[in-house]
Image: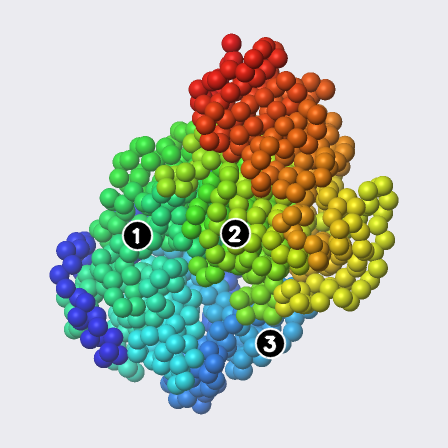
Amino acid sequence: MKFIASILLILTMSSGISINAQASGDHPRLFAAKEDRQAILDKIKNESWAHASWKAVLNDIDVYVDRHIDDPKWITSRLAMYWKDGERYTQCYIKKQDWDYGEGNAPLPTVRLPGMRRWNDYLNVPLEDRIPYNETGDMLGISRSSGDDTPVVIPYKESGHMIRQNNMEILKLAEKSAFAYYLTQEEKYAKFSSDIFWTWMLGTYYMNPPLDPKESAGGPGGYEAGGILGYYDYEVIHDDRQTPMAITYDFLYDYLNEHPHEHLKTINKKPVDVAEIVFKRFIEIGLVRGGKKGNWNVNRYKNIIGSMLVLESNDFYKDGKGREHYIPFYTEKSGKHYAGLPEILANYNTTTGLWPESPGYASGMIPFVLDMGLKLYKSGVNTLAGNPIVNKAALANLGWLDARGNLVLFGDMRGGPPNMSAFESLLTYATWEGDKETVEKMATVIRKNIASGYHDRTKSDWKGIVFNQPLPDSGNELPFHKAAYSPFHRHLIMKNGNDENNALMFTLYGGRYQSHLAENGLAMQFYSKGWVMSPDASAYESYWSKDAGYHRGITGSNTIVPGYKKGEITINAMNPWVEPSKSFYNTSSISDKVSFADVSADEKRRLVAMIRTSETTGYYVDVFRSDQNKNDYIHHNLGNSVVLKGKDNGILELKSVNDLGTEYNKNYSFFKNQNKVSYTDDFNASWVVNNTQPNMITDMWMMGQKNREIYTVDAPPTTIRGDITPGQVNKSPETTPTLIIRQNGINGSKHPFVSVFESYETGEKSIKSITKTGEFIGLICLTVNSKESTQFILSATDHKIFKPSKQLKFQGTFAVASEKNGAFEYLYLGEGNLIQNGVHKIEAVQGTVSAELKFEDGKYYYSSDKPLSIQTKKGKAKIYPAGYDVEIK
C-alpha cells in the first residue's frame, strides 16, 4: 500500500482541473442530482421509449424486491461468498493464474474470488435455482455449446467466470433498485439495495487483494505494482463489481447513513469510512495494474471512474485524496502503468478514426470514453470539448458495418451490432452544449439504426433513461461508401448497395499478430441478403479453449495454407480506390457494376471482384495465387449441407478418408468427417441453408487444375451468437460444411485457384454457365453467362497484351467486358492499359488507368481516373480527359 501511495503522491500535483465543490452528503451526483429527479420523471411520462424502459427496469427488480420484504435473506444468500465460519478468508493466493487457497477468518463472510482466470463452457442456472449460502463455491451450470440444458455441478476451481457473473447479476439488481429508490422514494427499493450493498461492501472490506507468490500473472499481487491482477479479479479489466456498487452507494447515500449496518458500530466506522477504504483500493490497485496500452487501459478507467467520482473532495479525507486528487489520473496524467485520456485519444488514427485493435474491441473503446465523459461532465469536468477525434472515432465504426448493421468479423470478436451508446452519448453531450449540428447528425444515426431494427430505445437501461435525450427532427439516411480501407488492420471492404435484400459486399484482409487481430492469411468473406455467407469462424468459448487456435487462426478463415499469415500487404490495384493517407473511404467510383481488389502478401496474391448483374443479382470472382507447390484452399460457407458436382453436372462421389493430416497446420485436427475425391476438371459446390424460408443457397464454381484432391469436412461451429447467421445456421454445436481443395506438386501461382460464388434464395439463381477461355500462364479469362448478361472476366499478373479470343484484347491487372442480349453493355478496366471487345476499346494514354465505358439508353458514357483513349461504334479512337459519368457526344 505504501508503494502505491508514494507513486500517487509523486504524481499528484496541481492539475488545474476544476470540479464542482461539493460537501460530504452532496449525493447523488454520478448520474443525476436530487434536483434532476423531476426532469427524469417528466421524461418517463412524455417519452414513450423512456416509459417502456422504466417499466422494464421495474419488471426486472420488483419480483425480487417484493420477496425481500418477507424474505430478506433470499437474495443475499445467493451471493458467492466465503460463507463458512473458519473459512471466511481475508487473503487468497494465486497459482498459475488461478485460485490456489485462502487464509484468515473475517468476522463476516467475505466475497468469494472467482475460481479461475479462464472461461469455461458453462452459464449459471437461473437465480432461483442457485445454491443459497454456497459454502463450497461449486456452481450449477448449463453448457453453452452442447445443446443440453441439464444443470451439472462445476467445481469451484473449474468454474471460470461463473462466480463473477453470479455476483455481478445480483449487484446489478441492487444498482437498478437504488435508481428506483431515487425516483420513487419507496423504502422497499432502498432496503433491498442496501442489504446487497452491505453484504458485498463489508465482505470486500475484510478481504486483502490476492497474492501471487510466483508472479504467474506478471506481478506479486497484493498492493504492489505490476502484473494484471485486479483487487477482486484476475484481470484488472474485469475488476468491475465496484461499478454497480459505486452507483448504489451514490443513490443510497442518505439512506445508508440513516440506516447504517450494525457491524459498523463494532468497527467504529461510518458508511463513508468503509466506502473510502474499499473504493480507494480499487482505484489505487487499478492504476498500477494491466499496462498502459490498448483496451486494457481504457477498460481499467471504465471500472474505476465511478469509484473516483463518488468520493468526497480532498479536504474531507485525512490523506487529502478525494475526487480532485484522482480525476487527473484519467483526464491529464500518464505513468508507468497507466495512460490518461490524452494518450488514449492519441491511439486513434487521425485519418481513419479507428482504434488499433479488431472491430469488436475497437468499437467498444469510444463508447467507454464517452460514457466516462458524461459522468465527468456532471462533476464539472469537460473531457469532450476540443477533442474532434471523439466524433470521428464514433462515426468511423459505421464504416465497419454490413447492410444489416453488424460489424465485419475478423480478429478476436464475435460479430453483431456495434455499441450504439456512443451515438446516444454524443447526442446527450451535444444537447447539453447546444451543438445543434452534432445533435442532428447523431439523431440521424440513431434514427437510421432504429429504422433498420438495429437499435431499440424502448430497451434502454436505467442509465439511458437518465442520459438519453429526446430525438429532434433529423434525416434518417447516412452517407454510403463503396469502399473502406485501413492499412493498420490490413483490411478492406467493398460494397455495392447498402440494403440488406440486394446489397453485395466483400472483405479482403491480411494477417496481423497481436492487437486482437489474427494471422488470417489473405482471407476473404462475401455477403448475401445482408448475411456474411463465408464467415470467419468465431465459436470458441475463450482464449483458453482447446479450439481457440482454430477459430483465431488461419484455419478458421477462407484462405490458402500453408504460407503467409502475418506481415504487410501490398494493394496492387483496387477500385473504388481509397487513398489511405487521406481518408478511410473512397472519394470517387468508376463503375456501378464492378468493384475489385488485388492484394499481395509474401508469396500469395489474391484478387476478389464483385460483379453486379442487375439491381437484385450479382456474383463474386476469386483468383488466388500462391507461389508454392503445396497448397490447401480452405472455404467455409454457411449451410446445413454441401453437395459437389462435376463438369457434367453429375454428383461427385467422395469416399471417407483419414488422410487429411495436420502437416499444414496443427488445427487441422478440428476438421472431422473427412471425405475425398481426386478430380481435376471444373466442379461446382452448393451449400443450402434450409433453416430459412425460402432457403438460401451458395453456389461455387471452381476452375479445374491438375494434381488436385477435393475434401469435404465438418469444420467447427461458425458462431456462438444467435443473430449473425440466417436461421442460426452453423451456430454451436452445429458444425460448418467446409471445402478443402488440395493441390500438390503444381505451383499455385502459375496454376491458381479460380472460383466464382453466387448466393441467392430459392428460385433466384442468375448464373447459367461459367467457362474458362483459353490456356495462359499469367492470365485467367472466364466467361460468366447469366440470365441478365454475359461477362468476360480477365485477371493478369503479366504486364503484356493477351488475346484470349478474336474479340478480346487485354493488358492490365483486371478487366470486364459485358454484353447484354449479345450487344455491348460496358467495358471496365482496373489498373490497366487496354481492354477491347470487338470495336469497343478503352486504352490508357500514359501509364495505367482505371476506367469504364458503358452504353445506356442509346448513349455512351465513360468514367476514368486519368486521360484515356476510347473507341466506339461511332468511329476512330479519341482521347478524353479524366472524369466521371461523362456523356460522349
Reading the image, the residue beneath label 3 is 154
What element does badge 3 sit on? Answer: strand
Q: Residue at x 47, y 81 (%)?
A: 96
Q: Residues within 10 Å of mark 2 (few under 14, many from 20)?
A: many
Q: Please determine whether, in this image, residue 764 is positioned above or below residue 397.
A: above
Q: Residue at x 66, y 57 (%)?
A: 629
Reading the image, the residue beneath label 1 is 346
Reading the image, the residue beneath label 2 is 601
Looking at marks 1 and 2 on the same chain, the residue that comes earlier in the sequence is marked by 1
Q: Percent from the top left, x then y, of residue 610?
A: 60, 36
Inter-mark Cα distance, 3 to 1: 44 Å
**Label 2 amino acid?**
Ala
Looking at marks 2 and 3 on the same chain, the residue that comes earlier in the sequence is marked by 3
Q: Residue at x 68, y 40 (%)?
A: 776
Inter-mark Cα distance, 1 to 2: 29 Å
Q: Percent from the top left, x then y, of residue 215?
A: 40, 81
**Label 3 amino acid?**
Ile
Looking at marks 3 and 1 on the same chain, the residue that comes earlier in the sequence is marked by 3
**Label 1 amino acid?**
Ala
* Residue depth check, mark 2 versus mark 3: number of the one nearer the observer: 2
Q: Please determine whether, in this image, residue 28 is positioned above or below residue 238.
A: above
Q: Percent from the top left, x then y, of residue 234?
A: 43, 73
- Determine the image quadrant of residue 439: top left
Along the horizontal axis of the image, is 318 left or right of 494? Answer: left
Q: Report whether residue 88 is seen.
A: no
What element does badge 1 sit on? Answer: helix
